[in-house]
Image: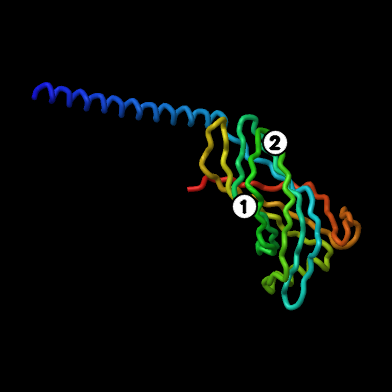
Amino acid sequence: MADDCGRHDDKQQLAKRVAVAIFGFLIVFAIVVFLVWAILHPTQPHFILQDVTIYAFNLTAPNYLTSNMQITLVSRNPNERIGIYYYKLDVLASYRNQQITLPTLIPRTYQGHQDVTVWSPLLYGNAVPVAPFLEVGLNHDMNAGMVLFNVKAFGQLKWKVGTWISGRYQININCPVYISFTGPTKAIQVGVAMKYQLVQSCSVDISLLN
């Protein structure tokens, strides 16, 4: 009986040691990951709206806006040791904070160290109702010959350091677009469309998802 009790105590001690060793390893691993993350703290990617090709941008009664366009969005990863996975990145156009096109989904993309990625999605908004006060403002802008709208992208990304991949982060991108409809412009006619060379820097906001 005493031998059985002794063996039982030995097994308990062994189990405790194994548990302590595993716990200690996890703590050390977490500290190493944290230190690597702190040392290699990522710089957010840079985005540029290269150009916008306008196929349609017009108002019809009573207050419907049709805006069809293709954009060229360029992203650069400035990090030397950190890659970026883009998840579910949607792109749309808005006028004075009202969405005027359907969101277009960009395929999942991995961006390596200091890589440059180019997307050229089509944005469609056919007969989209706009608020009456926005119709007034848009009519005024178009009569003045200059319209400001925004191309926005939003989605999620993950950082990749070696084989380690972070949790998901929310990314929001905002690119202002100035389009001139009268007088001298930098637009190039492409068939029935007008292509505007912009090379416009975009604001980027990244935050950790809860």
Q: Is residue 81 left or right of residue 164?
A: right
What residue is at 26 percent from the left and 28 percent from the top? 15
Q: Quadrant of residue 96?
A: bottom right
Instruction: Count residues near mark 1 (Cα–Cα under 10 Å), then give few for <14, some for 14-19, many for 20+.
Output: many
Residue bearing the label numbered 1: 154
On screen, residue 86 versus residue 5, left or right, reads right
* Label 1 secondary element: strand
Viewer-nearest residue: 22 or 92: 22
Q: Earlier in the sequence, mark 2 or mark 1?
A: 2
Residue occupying the far right of the picture: 184
Of the residues shown, which amino acid type is indicated by label 2? Asp
Residue at 61%, 39% (x, y): give it.
Answer: 84
Is 173 or 5 nearer to us in this picture? Answer: 5
Q: Residue furthest bottom?
A: 62
Where does the image place residue 174, in percent across and percent down from the top left? Answer: 67, 52
Vertical relation: 134 (above or below) 158: below
Q: Secondary structure at mark 2?
A: loop
Give the spatial CA distance, label 2 vs label 1.
20 Å
Residue count near mark 2 (Cα–Cα under 10 Å), binned few <14, some 14–19, many ≥20: some
What amino acid type is highlighted by mark number 1? Phe
Q: Residue at x 67, y 57 (%)?
A: 104
| Quarter of the figure that contains the N terminus | top left
Q: Which mark is residue 115?
A: 2
User: Residue at (83%, 50%) from the top-left corner?
Assistant: 197
Could you tell me residue 77's position as x and y percent?
67, 37
Which color scheme is applied?
rainbow
